[in-house]
Amino acid sequence: MFRIENAQKIMLGFLIVSSALITSCKKDSAAEDGQASVPEKNDLQTPTTNREFLTRDSIFLYAKQTYFWNIGMPAYDDFNPRRYSNNDQVLAALKALPSTGGKDKYSFIDDGKVATQLGGVSGDYGFSANYDSGNLLRVKYVYPNSPAALAGLKRGYIISNINGRTTLRNSQADIDNVNDGILGSNPTISLTVTKPDQSVQSFVVARGTYNINPILFSNTYTVGTKKVGYLVFNSFTTNSLPLLDAAFNKFTTDGVTELIIDLRYNGGGSVATSEAFTNLIAPAAQNGKVMYTTYWTKTMQDHQATILQNQKFYDTNSSGVKSLFSMFDYDYKPIAAAGNQEFFKKRGSLNGLTRVYFLVTGGTASASELLINNLKPVMDVKLIGRKTYGKPVGFFAIHINKSDLYIPQFQTKNSADFGDYFDGMTVDKDLADDLTRDFGDPAESLLSQAINYSATGRFTSFTKDNAISSTSGISSVQIDQANEKLNHEFKGMIETQKPLLK
């Protein structure tokens, strides 16, 4: 995979390509902000200086050369990107092309917030919510030191009111209200909650900037004669490695021989962080062996994605000289010499793990699935919860005008050459998420199954696991479908490391 010596360079040059850098090299206004020039031959379109038209052109033209499903895409004139009224409509039309086979549920356009969050800084309220098995809206997590945490909000609290409106799930309008309240642009959110002791409290939480700590909980349990480590990891941010190292050092000190990694709400993030996490868990005996291979778009492998010349950044070459490069200057072949094969390299001193359990849901995606897929061929891996999201593809940001375009450009496959989990990874124990208990509570449904398996070598069986709730009359499947519509978490596998120069 790509190599990097300075993460700060990547965030500047790779994820957020500065228009100033591009301007220094390009005089054509259509290319100054990563936009592509309109094809010389276009029967339908005419040359223009309209930046909105040029942006829509660029979205299509970048996809034509770098999109994972670009084989069979129509010609520029046949697609006609300018007929759409906005950028999102262009992207939606790309995702609906027959060439995708209906697989693209991943592409999106962002204003730079994703790159900031990937670096470990957020500017929201710091919490999220889902409906529980009783159809009650509950806080599902709160980031430490976030505005929500400082206000006193905790996982498991029942939210009965958001901004003066009920949270009853009777229609899509109710779901929209929850989304607008938590994810909207309002400077504050007002909440009425019921705590576990049945007391009712009102909160007003102001949006604020805070550093993301993706480790929401960590502990070591004694299970018979074993020590079992448990860690809730919520996002693969680029700033999380010191936190992970500290947690695993504690596991080593505790004598942990099995691990429970809770990824139930983790939609992904940095590929580099996922690799490092893999190496914290994997046995040292795997050192030097292939972890996974990255397969880029064939156009990129064949060095035909010339449009990437518009994506420029400064970096220091092997001679120590700072130079201007573009994403076209790299080798995308799926071989070690190109930097597109990653090898195991043990990190930390926790070795000899016999088994790792992953707690997952439909929100477990991308870099989380990469971590699981990397380990499956080399360890005893158990999945508990719901089938994962299914995202074996990833991307880097393409800067166009004032936006970052994220379209899949590569797929990863593990050492067993497996990576086709577009429909998600199936679980060994199918079980609904338990929002009624806090992280780390041994009675919490998913955690208790892992602890029980560690103790007995089997999962317990409950007929009510997927049954209709006695309190709401709604099945857990219907609850899961409702929670999918809340769509709170970013889902992505972002390559933040530079490739090797050709």
Image (cartoon, rainbow, N blue to C red):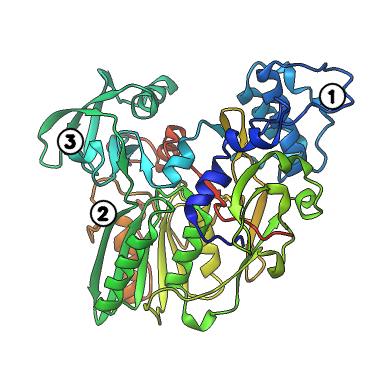
If you read the primary sequence from the N terminus, does the residue marked by circle 1 or circle 3 appear first? 1
Say which of marks 2 and 3 sits in front: 3
Q: Nearer the viewer, mark 1 or mark 2?
A: 1
Quadrant containing the C terminus in the rendered view: bottom right
Above or below: residue 190 compared with residue 134: above
What residue did someone put label 2 on?
A: 439
The residue that disc 3 covers is: 151
- Residue 500 marker: none
**Location of residue 153 in the rendering, given as x and y in whole percent from the top left corner:** 20, 38
Residue at 25% x, 28% y: name it.
206
> For residue 147, which quarter of the picture?
top left
Cα–Cα span, label 2 and label 3: 19 Å
Q: Is residue 451 visible?
A: no
Question: Residue 435, percent across and down?
Answer: 29, 45
Q: Which mark is residue 77?
A: 1
Q: Is residue 87 above or below residue 311?
A: above
Residue depicted at 34% across the width and 33% down the height? 124
Q: Secondary structure at mark 3?
A: helix
- Nearest to the observer: residue 290 or residue 225: 290
Query: In this view of the protein, which residue sits in the foreground, 480 or 124?
Result: 124
